[in-house]
Amino acid sequence: MSDVGQMVFLPRLLERLARVAPRVNIDTVQVQASRMRDVALESGEVDLAMGYFENFDGSFRQQMLFDARYVGMVRRGHPTISDTLTLETFLNTPQLVYQPRGGGHGFQETAVDQAFAVAGVPRRVAVRAAYAMGVTYILSNTDLLVVVPSRLAAACGELADVNVLALPVDIPKFQVRQYWHERFHQDPGNSWLRGIVAELFQDHRTRAPAPAINCVSSG
């Protein structure tokens, strides 16, 4: 999982494990290049991949957890942005771009760039941040605007005084899933862990199996 995954998933997961399986230990691994990620899952070095990923090919199973959307975020007390974000303000506010390694959030940047292109306004990216923890600190001390997943914004809101805003541009939602290798589908430990994950994080409205692309699907 990414650092965003640690902020979104780990607190609730560890709270549950402390009650039902206090002797279980969890190690998180930073998202790597797709080939290294796939090898780690196939070998059993990694049990689960959790988050939004592109290019998941091969003998993998997947389970959708929830749909996610993007929002805007600024510090509370921003000089030009309060509780709403107009298109004009969005286009004219310098931005912080959260650009983590791995995952698949490139399409979000493409959608934002397209909005600027249509408006004929140059986009000023003041800083690019590779880690989510840096986002909160930077926003707290600048007048920058950032576009991030809504659950990351909620986690940031517990660390700093920020305003979370609906975006005036259309950015497609994305699906957060957990993935595991076919070799470990019947493994009791793997099955138990992903069951805990699904119980904690799966949106009950999306429990029907999702279609798989280049991997085996599991609902």
Image (tube, rainbow, N blue to C red):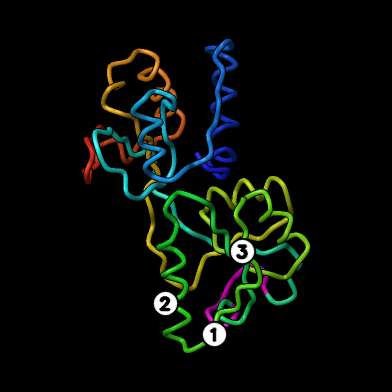
Q: Which mark is residue 114?
A: 2
Percent position of residue 55, x then y: 32, 49
On the picture, is 134 further left or further right than 188? right
Q: Which residue is mark 1?
A: 122
Q: Which residue is mark 3?
A: 128
First of labels 3, 1 by sequence position: 1
Is residue 82 magenta-colored? yes
Q: Nearer the viewer, residue 93 or 161?
A: 93
Q: Amino acid at mark 2?
A: Gln
Q: Amino acid at mark 3?
A: Arg
Q: CA distance from mark 2 to mark 1?
A: 11 Å
Vertical position of residue 79 compared to residue 51: above or below = below
Is residue 41 magenta-colored? no
Q: Amino acid at mark 1?
A: Pro
For the point 75% across and 59% down, which residue is it?
Answer: 140
Percent position of residue 183, x then y: 27, 22
Percent position of residue 158, x then y: 68, 45
For the point 41% across and 65% down, which residue is it?
Answer: 171
In what element is the residue under mark 3?
strand
Q: Nearer the viewer, residue 61 or 171?
A: 61
The nearer-to-camera label among 2 and 3 is 3
Per the picture, the main secondary structure of the magenta-coloured stretch is loop
What is the magenta range? 81-89
